[in-house]
Image (cartoon, helix red, strand yellow):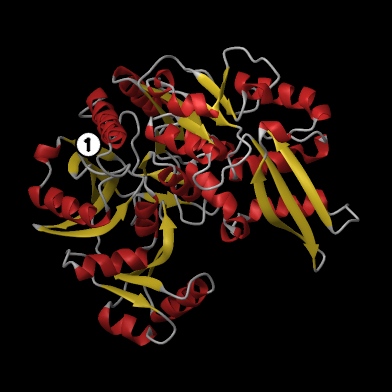
């Protein structure tokens, strides 16, 4: 994969790097050879990214050509925006306070070269800034106010602006960066496109096991997608890929959402997309959505401190209480008495002003219908855990036990369940969803829509086997190709 360093003048970059070509901005913008290159990684080290300057057009045309510029146009705009600088995450703010606390001055400037600083004690802060503002070289300005350090501005450093004494360090940092020893550029086999799978190895109950990810990887590589598993620390690398597949439990106040949002902003194809994460993660939203569109669901009431008696009158007992952002059966309880109802609601209200109260529908299993790109993908019966009313039973120590499962061909699942699940998923988007449906006789009701459904080897793929993963890979490929051809956004349905 070709790598270019673009500067105002080739003499601005005095160091030679293996397999890296240095080219001046005008040649890159006007030379037909560069316009015809494919899968290029480009590092824009022009002095200025001012609107409509040569440096601005290098990144802009790179994106139009399907190249991967650092910084991207999005990053260039972010660096100009004081609001974006202020809206950085708590992790970065904590690192700023920790690293700059010993300083006695009221202002501080930090130069970041490929995620590093000459002073080793600022290396971690430099990496945080590099991940937030993905530019090869940047300068951050800090000021102290009310005994707290604040990031006041970020600007790119052009190659021409690097002080002469810094060049040996800059060259070393660049060599490590290009060699992939800083968690950045890693060499991949030749492929049409690159897809990242976000996974946290520390997650106790991930939505896909290792074997399922291996099967998906084989399917993706068969259609020309190079796959790399990335982790929570790889936020700054998103722009290196064409697509992102999130295989972690998602939440809006979690790094999975930040990854999805960043990827969508960079124009990647994303499953789960950020809108689906927000919509599926809140059961208050889902209850209102299903009701508004007349999707059959259990009797539901959004409970607050003023309507406890209404819960008893309209929902009755026993009933199920759900914390709005609950997942994997956590934050979901069954109450059988009015006293328990009031006690549990009071406990839930410490976390959220609103709680979902839902009628209890006893069944021996739930249907899980997998929907991909608006089409049914799999159908499973998840049976309740032994001597429990949910499919997952947790003991006092948090240990989990699951009920049995049965996977069926979609064609053999009840048509009403499949149609209902498809309708519910379409209200969320066109990604990958798992719709939970309860069956009572010939009546079906939607319990919830999950944006990151389990796909585990031997369970959800028991019928389609490798074909399930091929269908997933095909959706990613079609969407990437449509985006490259300019037919809509990263997640538009083909």
Q: Is residue 454 left or right of residue 128?
A: left
Viewer-proximal residue among 257 and 285: 257
Q: Is residue 283 left or right of residue 203?
A: left
Residue 349, how many percent across, how many down? 49, 75
**Helix or strand or loop: what does disc 1 sit on?**
strand
* Residue that lies at the very extreme toward the top in this rendered image: 18
Establish if 113 lies above or below 266. above
The answer to which image quadrant residue 134 occupies is: top right
Q: Is residue 239 left or right of residue 480?
A: right
* Residue located at (48% from left, 43% from top): 73
Establish if 300 lies above or below 119. below
Viewer-proximal residue among 197 and 111: 111
Residue 477, how many percent across, how many down? 28, 29
Viewer-proximal residue among 142 and 231: 142
Residue denoted by label 1: 407
Residue 399 visible in this rendered orientation of the protein: no
Residue 274 visible in this rendered orientation of the protein: yes
The answer to which image quadrant residue 113 occupies is: top right
* Residue that lies at the very extreme toward the right in this rendered image: 104
* Residue located at (37% from left, 41% from top): 270
Residue 492, how many percent across, how many down? 26, 44
Residue 297, how many percent across, how many down? 21, 65
Q: Quadrant of the C terminus?
A: top left
Q: Is residue 47 left or right of residue 27?
A: right
Total numbered labels placed on residues in the image: 1
Viewer-proximal residue among 58 and 142: 58
């Amino acid at each position: 994969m070709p790598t270019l360093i673009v500067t105002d003048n080739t003499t601005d970059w005095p160091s030679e790097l293996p397999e890296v070509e240095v080219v001046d901005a005008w040649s890159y913008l006007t030379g037909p050879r560069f316009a015809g290159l494919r899968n290029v990684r480009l590092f824009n080290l022009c002095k200025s990214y001012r609107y409509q300057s040569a440096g601005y057009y290098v990144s802009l045309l790179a994106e139009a050509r399907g190249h991967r510029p650092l910084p991207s146009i999005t990053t260039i705009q972010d660096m100009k925006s004081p609001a974006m600088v202020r809206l950085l995450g708590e992790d970065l703010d904590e690192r700023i306070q920790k690293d700059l606390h010993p300083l006695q001055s009221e202002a501080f400037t930090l130069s970041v070269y490929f995620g590093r600083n000459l002073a080793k004690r600022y290396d971690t802060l430099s990496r945080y800034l590099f991940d937030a503002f993905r530019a090869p070289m940047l300068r951050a300005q800090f000021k102290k106010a009310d005994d707290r350090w604040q990031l006041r501005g970020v600007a790119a450093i052009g190659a021409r602006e690097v002080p002469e004494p810094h060049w040996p360090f800059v060259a070393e940092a660049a060599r490590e960066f290009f060699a992939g020893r800083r968690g950045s550029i890693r060499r991949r086999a030749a492929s049409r496109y690159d897809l990242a799978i976000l996974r946290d190895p520390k997650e106790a109950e991930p939505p896909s096991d290792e074997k399922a990810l291996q099967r998906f990887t084989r399917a993706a590589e068969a259609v020309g997608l190079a796959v790399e598993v990335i982790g929570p620390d790889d936020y700054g690398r998103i722009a290196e890929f064409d697509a992102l597949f999130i295989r972690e439990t998602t939440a809006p106040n979690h790094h999975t959402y930040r990854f999805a949002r960043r990827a969508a902003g960079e124009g990647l194809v994303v499953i789960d997309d950020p809108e689906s994460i927000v919509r599926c993660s809140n059961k208050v939203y889902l209850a209102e959505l299903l009701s508004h569109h007349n999707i059959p669901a259990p009797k539901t009431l959004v409970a607050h401190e003023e309507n406890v008696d209404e819960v008893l009158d309209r929902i009755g007992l026993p009933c199920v209480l759900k914390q709005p952002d609950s997942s994997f059966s956590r934050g979901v309880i069954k109450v059988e008495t009015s006293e328990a109802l009031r006690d549990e609601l009071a406990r839930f209200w410490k976390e959220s002003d609103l709680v979902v109260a839902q009628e209890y529908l006893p069944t021996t299993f739930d249907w899980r219908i997998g929907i991909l790109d608006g089409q049914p993908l799999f159908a499973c019966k998840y049976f309740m855990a032994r001597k429990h009313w949910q499919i997952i039973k947790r003991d006092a120590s948090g240990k989990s036990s699951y009920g049995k499962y049965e996977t069926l061909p979609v064609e053999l699942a009840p048509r009403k369940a499949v149609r209902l699940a498809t309708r519910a998923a379409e209200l969320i988007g066109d990604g990958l969803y798992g719709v939970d449906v309860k069956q009572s006789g010939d009546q079906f009701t939607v319990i919830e829509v999950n944006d990151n459904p389990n796909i585990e080897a031997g369970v959800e793929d028991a019928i389609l086997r490798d074909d399930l993963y091929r269908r997933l890979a095909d959706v990613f490929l079609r969407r990437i190709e449509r985006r490259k051809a300019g037919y809509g956004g990263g997640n538009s349905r083909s």
